[in-house]
Every structure is written in structure tokens, then in C-alpha cells.
Amino acid sequence: MRILQGIDLVKVERMERMIDRTSGKAFLDRVFTAAEQAYCGSKRMKFEHYAARLAAKEAVLKALKVRPKKNRRLSEIEVRREATGKPYIALSSKSRKEFHIPVQAQIELSVAHEREYAIATVVIVVP
């Protein structure tokens, strides 16, 4: 059994600048799924929600000891919510294969955000 852990912190202002730059559509599509964009876009403090999701995706990469690549689409790593509101990570089959993560691996996610920062921690238990 392997236990992998990652953490990331994102400044909300930086996220807002990245999205606002040239309307941010290409950035949003590369980093966030349509469902994530719909969720974050519906929130009053949408940039905090976007920042939390980016922190979660980066925390996954850190846990897996994977360097971000220019052509890697972070939208292959999706933050979803259970009925209770608890966030969780959903990996595409392409990402599972690329990162060598079996389906039975357990991925735990915790996120928090406030006006200036968003933080995420990820723990992956691989049998």
C-alpha cells in the first residue's frame, strides 16, 4: 500500500487575473470542466471557488509527484461534490492510466477558501 499526499495554496487575486486576461475562456476550458465552470460561475465569490479547484488539481499532481506539463489539460482532474456537499476528485480514465492510479485507489480531498487564498490537501491511498 502507498499513501501519497499533496497540498497547494492559490492566491484568489491571481486566479481572478488569469481568468480576466483575454476573457479567460481558453484558460477556463484548459483547466476546468464545463460542470466546474457552471458551478463556480454561479457563485457570488466565483474566483474563490475557481482558486480552490485549481489548488485541488495542483495538490493531486503534487501527491503523484507529477510536474505540470504545458500540454496537460488540468480539466482531466475534476472536482465534484457529493450530495452532502463534500468535494471529491474524479479522474478521467486517461489520467488514471497516465498517472498509474488503479480504480480501487481512494482519493480524499479537503478544500478551504476565503477572500485572499484557497487551499487544498489531497491524500491518495493506493492498494
Image (cartoon, rainbow, N blue to C red):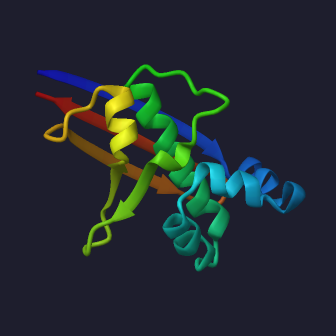
Q: Is residue 52 above or below residue 67?
A: below
- Image quarter where the C terminus lies is top left
Horizontally, residue 121 falls left or right of residue 35, namely left
- Residue for point 65% across, 56% down: 29
Horizontally, residue 114 falls left or right of residue 104, namely right
Horizontally, residue 107 falls left or right of residue 22, namely left
Judging depth in this view, the residue of 102 and 105 nearest the camera is: 102
Q: Which of the 4 quarters of the picture holds residue 50? A: bottom right
- Image quarter where the N terminus lies is top left
Judging depth in this view, the residue of 64 and 76 nearest the camera is: 76
The image shows a total of numbered marks equal to 0
Q: Is residue 9 above or below residue 32?
A: above
- Residue for point 42% across, 56% down: 79
- Residue for point 51% across, 53% down: 53
Q: Is residue 56 above or below residue 105?
A: below
Q: Position of residue 24 (x, y in %)?
A: 79, 58
Q: Position of residue 126 (x, y in %)?
A: 17, 29
- Residue for point 33% across, 44% down: 93
Q: Position of residue 77 (x, y in %)?
A: 44, 46
* Residue lying at the far right of the rendered structure: 22
Q: Position of residue 14 (x, y in %)?
A: 75, 47
